[in-house]
Image (cartoon, rainbow, N blue to C red):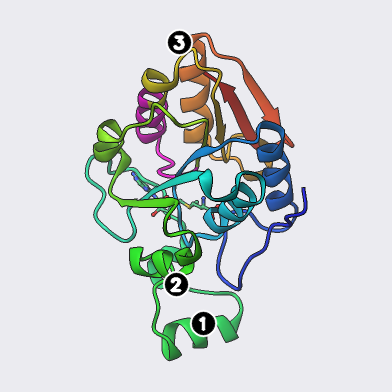
Amino acid sequence: MKNKYKSYWRKSGLKGKWGEIYLNHLDQFKPKNFLEIGVFCGVTARNTCEYLNEIHGNTFSYIGIDLFGGKKEAVSDEIEPTFLQKQNFSNPLKKIYYNYIVKENLNSLESNQKFLKKFKNNIKLIAGDTNVVLKSIDLNHIDYVFLDGGHSYQTVINDLEILLRNLKGKNKVVLCDDYGKASFIKEVKNAIDDFSEKNNIQIRIISNRFAELIF
Ligand SMILES: C[S@@+](CC[C@H](N)C(=O)[O-])C[C@H]1O[C@@H](n2cnc3c(N)ncnc32)[C@H](O)[C@@H]1O
């Protein structure tokens, strides 16, 4: 694998070594049809598309779902990245550039479409709350899911139940963020534990952070 996880001077959920660990995990499975729940500023999406393009040429597909600044529909206890509230960068140059010069909201649908333009024929970005939109998306062809959207207990359970209904018995991979100690979110871990116990699915913890589930 030639690709290194790049940040593209944006903001990513996977900083430093986590991007490399994520790309190495992708490389173990070499998926062709990919779903990311929680696109944020598109950095993992872009790295994923660069990787899929490298191994499959232009025959891969990527679907990304995010609120993209829209309203959450069903759940009131959602945990949002604080960055999304005021687009507060720790790097003052980024703050000046994005907030005052180009005035671009990096989590908007428009910004993500522009950033991922190179792969416009292979990608589909869907704006909406997964509690509402996920059940109406055709997921049958998906090989690999990166689950990193809403982090409330109910949203994680809902997302996993819908994914299971569509992917069960097909040996498909769901990589969930924020399960292990390295980026622990209690609601996420509790939801994955309860879901896995109920459906008799094994959890493999990757690098003390991600939970890998095989459906
Ligand atoms: C932690 S960020 C995702 C980070 C991204 N995967 C990355 O690697 O850079 C979580 C994203 O999930 C989105 N989100 C939160 N609740 C959601 C929901 N119920 N439905 C869809 N997207 C949601 C937020 O807007 C946010 O952009």
The answer to the question of whether label 1 and label 2 lie on touching residues, with beta carbons closer than 8 A, is yes
Residue where numbered disc 1 is placed: 95
Closest to the observer: 9 or 115?
A: 115
Q: Callout 2, which amino acid?
A: Gln
Q: Tell me how far mark 3 sits from mark 2, CA to CA.
A: 38 Å
Most common secondary structure along the magenta stretch: helix
What residue is shown at x 42% (from left), y 70% (from top)? 114
SS under mark 2: loop
Image coordinates of residue 122 in percent, x first then y, are: 45, 51
Give the mark, 1 or 3, whose residue is nearer the N terminus: 1
Image coordinates of residue 4 in percent, x first then y, are: 74, 57
Q: Which mark is residue 87?
A: 2
Q: Callout 1, which amino acid?
A: Lys
In-image side of 31 versus 83 (left or right): right
Q: Callout 3, which amino acid?
A: Lys
Residue where numbered disc 3 is placed: 198
Q: Tell me how far mark 1 sits from mark 3, CA to CA.
A: 45 Å
Image coordinates of residue 198 in percent, x first then y, are: 45, 10
Report the magenta residues as a range. Answer: 148-162
What residue is shown at x 26% (from left), y 39% (from top)? 133
